[in-house]
Every structure is written in structure tokens, then in C-alpha cells.
Image (tube, rainbow, N blue to C red):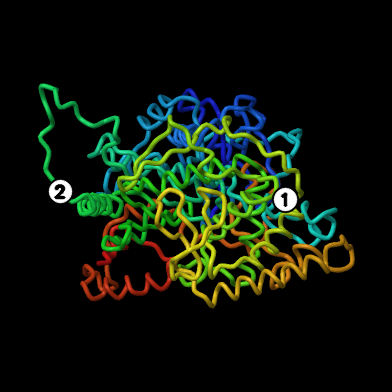
Amino acid sequence: MAASLGCVRRSHRTLIDITHVCSRHFASKGKRVQHRKKFDNPSIKSLFDDQPSRERTGQISSYKVAVDSRHDQAARSVLIRVQHALRAKASDHLLVEFEHHASVERLQQHVSFFPAPSQFPVCSRLLYAMRNSQMQRHRPSRSVKPEHVQTRDLLLNDYMTASTLSAQMEALHSVRRLSDVGSRLRYFVCSMVRDLVRTIFPHCRVDPFGSCSNGFGWEGCDLDMMLTMLPPDKHGDPNAKFHFLTKRGSEDERVFGKQCLDVVGEMIRTMMPSAYHVIKVLNARVPIIKFHHEVSGIDCDLSSVNVSGAKMSELMFLLGETDPRVRVLMTTVKQWARSCEVTQNAPGPWPSSFSLLAMLIFFLQTRSIPILPSIRSLHTPDDHFMIDGVDYAFVTDIRKVQRSSNRQTLEDLLHEFFHFYTHFDFATQGLSLIEGSAFTKHDPCPVYIENPVEVGHNIAKNISSEYIVKLQTAMLEALQCLESKNVPNDSEPWGLMCLFKPPLRSQTFSSLSVMGLFDEDADDVPSDERTEESDNELIREQTPARVEKDGHEPTAGSVAAEESRTAVDTSERSSPVKDTVSVS
């Protein structure tokens, strides 16, 4: 997002509390800084508190517990847009988490609509705080000690001064991984979609899946969501005296899912604040609704019930939590693959990030002392689920997974990973994550990686022979690079700096910018700092229809021409209703 975002966790009990927070911001001198300050008001707990980890608290025992905890956070949160204290064409955002759900409801009772007659009067938790000249101004105390937070810039010095390659890998992971704020925002968007759809489907669920929920996500990753119209626990009682009289859809489950997405896509297009460029891709193998959530800057994909995707996310989360080295290794492998153009963001004949993750898991399963268990060893009679008529089961309680006694370093494992796949015979051998061993394949695909939650499906069937050659060649070069440049050196690049092509110098990763929302010193605001084009897009969403220069209503041709220009320059925003495309 172009604007900054602050994250506040506090126990707001009155409207005055939240107004006080916004007035503090209006009075502040918000320059772009690399640090944060706590409020001098002790009732505000902290800024940018990390989600407690299982290692620290022991509370996160399963994927479901982690997801439900994030859902609960999101339901108790509001995202407030506030005007910048100094610049008229800039704004900041506050993601405020309340202690109780009732506090959000009480706040919404005091929120008004804009006066424009053409608005869709939707009550959401995306709010705009109007600048009020009568608000009390507060000056932050100079006694507040700033606390430094980690920047998203990987500087050359960070790697030159590292003592080991393992330390470099840890540093890379710390700046690449999805932050607490990034995760909160994605669950908040999920909750916004859920709240909207529940206005007509009161029992629906909207859950994230994929990298944004399994712990392998990066800053800036897309948000994949799964829509469940009627969860199993809400299915009707056939013995009930009364049943709702409803309209029937298609008996075909796939067609019915498309019908539901079509309806939900229209709701998002017309009524969801900050949702733009809505595209219905209904005739794809997996029908989805694509849209961009502008305030958070997140690209979103919404699909109907996807049991395999949800269970795969749960399995990857389980394996990632089993050993902390897994996610750090994956970050390095993924960054290396992108730098060598072994993989790309778009679908194609190259290994996807998920294929690389499956290869890494298989590698860790096959060590002399396995670091990860085979999926079969995770079998439990208590956790069953069905996909396409096949019965599956794996343990969901992380505490029941036995930890490995393998103590190899990240550096050693990275070397072995490249060596293992440089010499792996993809032509005759397939990879089974279920058994944790290779098998003789009979499939003509150049690479076969068994899907652990859809037996008989190859998750690497898209990879071509040319890219397997490219992958193994790049791995051989990486191995040679690490062997020749593995000694810490203050005068020349070594380790990851040589591994990534082009060599990693000063690399900036896209992320949320952290502003000194409550900083008192305004003299250091850079004059060339980029600002938003609009003072308030949320207000502009409520303005009456566009009028041509001659004073007449716009014609269909002029609107089409303007929409064509908007498709090229996505920085120009107008009504969210127009940005819709249906793909058949």
C-alpha cells in the first residue's frame, strides 16, 4: 500500500478512546522512519506485537487453533484511514484490535455514512476518520524511548558482517517472511468478505489457505480464500418441523459452486469498499473471483470449497512447525530459484514454489537421520477426511509429532539439498512424500511428485524436460559457488551474496511501510516523498457520477475509453463498480 499503516492493540471501551487515537495521529508529525514509539498512554498495550509463537507460549497446538486465533483477531479489528498531519494528499491507516467484539459493534453505532446519494450504504469495519479542527491536539512525550524494528532493506553490510552462511539464511528469512501485520491484514480482508457475504448467506465461512496461512508466505504474497456457503456443522436437521424455503441451484456440485461465486462476485464488485478490478474466472479448472483490495494492497483470489487446498495448507503448516529449519531453508531455496530464473511467479513449464517446497520436504524426509517424518507415519485414526472418495488421515496436533534428533546446520543442509537433486534421476524416479522415499515411476512426465492429499495426482506435471536440465545445472553452479565462497570475508562477497544471481547487493523487498505516526519532529520529512494521488479515495467512491467537460452525463463511449485508460494506469481509481470483467 502506498500509505503507511500502524497496528494498535488495546482495550477500547468508549468512542472517546478511539477518537483520542485518531486525534493523536492528526496532531502528530508523521515522517517516514525506521522505528516505532509506544503511546505514553499506558492503556495502549503496544505497536506491532508479534503473534505469540508456539515455542514461546505453547498455545498454538494445531493449524485450526492458529487460523481460529487469527480469525478472532480480525473480527475484533477495524481498519481506519486517517488524513496525514502535514500533507493534504497523503493518508495513513490504523489497524486497531479491540479486546471485545462488542466494542466494535459500539464503535459502528457511532459511524455515519457520507452524504453522497449514489453510495451503497454498507456497514463495514473499514472506516474513515474525518479531520476535525475541534479535536484536542496532543504532543507526544519526549521521554518516550523509540524501539527499533527491523527494516525490509537487505544491505550488503548485513551479509558481510554475518559470521556464518546459516546466519545469512536466518537474516534473509527474517525480512522475507510474512510479518505479523501482513498476516493480520490478510485475515482482516477475509473477514471483510465474510461479513459482506453473510448479509445474505448468514452461515458462510471465508478461510485463507496456501502460503498466507501455512507459514511459508512472503511479504506481498497474494491472498487465497476459500468460500464455504454452508459448513457441515450447519447442515439442516431432517427431523426438524420447519425448514427454510430456498431457491435451488444446480445439482452438479461444480456448477453450483460457479453459481455461488457468480453471486458473490457481484456483491464484491458493487458493495465491498476498496475492492477493485473484480474478475470472474468461472470456467477455469478451479473457478475463482479475482480482485485487488486497494487499502491493504493485496491481490485476492476467492474460490469455492477446496478441501484439498485447505488440507494441504494444514499439512504444510504442520511440517513447517515441526522443525524451524524448514521455513528458513525454503526461503533461501525460493530466493535462489527466482534469482536464477529457475522459477517464476506466473504459471509455466518451470517448477512452482510449491513444487520446490515438496522437493525440500522430500529431501528432509530422506536424511540419514530424517528431519521430517513421512506422511504415512503421521497417520492417526482420529483425524480423517475424504477427497474424491478417498479416505485420508494425518495428525493435526503438533505436540504429537516427534522432533528429530538431527542437528545439522542450515549451511550443511543447503549444501546437501543442491547435491541431492543435482544427482537425482528424475527420468526414472518419482518422489513420494507419503512414504518418504523414491519409487520407480511409470508416468511420462519429466518430473513426478506425488500429491500427498490427492493420490494419483502429480503436482509437478507442468515441469518440462528443459527446465529440469536448467534446474540441475543451476544447482551444480550453486554448489560450486558455495564451496568456493563459503568463508566469511569483509572485503568481498561470499555465501548468499554469491549464490543469488545477480549477486545480492542492496535489495529492497516490498512491504508495508512503517511510519512514525506519533513522532513529533516534522523537519526531516523528505520533500520528494511519494504521496497518494487522492486525498481520500474512500470519499471519491461516494461522489456523484462523472460529468463531461460540457456538463452532460458521460456517454457509453466516453466511459469505455476512460475504463480502457484505467486498465493501463491502475493508479487512477474511480467507482469500484466499473472494474469488473467476466472471463468465460
Q: Is residue 517 above or below residue 135?
A: below
Specify the amino acid type for callout 2.
Answer: Glu
Comparing 324 with 127, the one in front is 324
Q: Which residue is mark 1?
A: 170
Residue 77 in sight here: no
**Camera-side residue of 409 and 195:** 409
**Where residue 122 sits: x, y (%)?**
30, 42
The residue at 56%/60% (across/down) is 356
Say if 449 sits above or below 473 in the image. above
Q: Position of residue 314 (x, y in %)?
A: 48, 42
Residue at label 2?
Answer: 251
| Amino acid, disc 1 | Glu
Residue 315 against residue 162 in the figure, above or below: above
Percent x, y of residue 261 = 26, 52
Give the crowd class for mark 1: few <14, some 14-19, many >=20 residues within 10 Å. Answer: some
Q: Is 357 displayed left or right of 583 in the figure?
A: right
| Left or right: residue 225 compared with residue 86 | left
Secondary structure at badge 2 equals loop
Q: Nearer the viewer, mark 1 or mark 2?
A: 2
> Splitting the image into 4 quarters, where does residue 48 fall?
top right
165 on left or right of 62: right
At 65% from the left and 42% from the top, the residue drawn is: 323
Q: CA distance from mark 1 to mark 2?
A: 51 Å
Residue 74 shows in the view: yes
Quadrant containing the C terminus in the rendered view: bottom left
